[in-house]
Image (cartoon, rainbow, N blue to C red):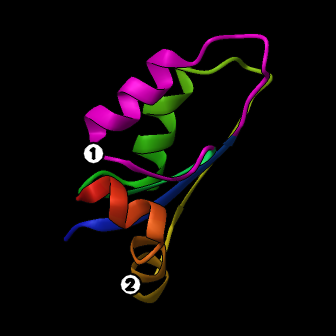
Amino acid sequence: MKRRLSISFELREDRPYDSLVLRLLHLGAVPVLPTQWILLTLLTVDEIKRDLQVHIDPADRILVTQVTLMSFRNLINNDKLRKGAA
């Protein structure tokens, strides 16, 4: 069964994070806000977190959480997300 994940991060601004964004896109994640993405995946929270940590600085923070179906639907109904999916 696929998991609905929310991925949020706090990054230092003095470093490019192109590899993080490319990895999120490769995984199929969709941005909701500049530092929050959603993802539908078979991978676990820990697997996604470990995967993404190689793309950030040790001083950065990342939070990966599994969300309920209702929360996921609310994020998907975000106007910005709908426009990006069109």
Eyeballing the image, is 5 above or below 64? below
The residue under label 2 is 69
Eyeballing the image, is 74 above or below 28? below
**Magenta residues (range):** 10-34
Alpha carbon separation for disc pair 1 and 2: 18 Å
User: 35 or 44: which is nearer to us?
Assistant: 35
Is 47 left, or right, of 33 in this rendering? left
The residue under label 1 is 28
Residue 15 falls within the magenta-colored stretch: yes
Q: Which mark is residue 55?
A: none
User: 30 or 68: which is nearer to us?
Assistant: 30
Eyeballing the image, is 14 above or below 45? above
Residue 75: % across, % down: 48, 72
Q: What residue lies at 49% left-to-right and 31% top-to-bottom? A: 52
Q: Quadrant of residue 5?
A: bottom left
Q: Quadrant of the C terminus?
A: bottom left
Eyeballing the image, is 46 above or below 23? below
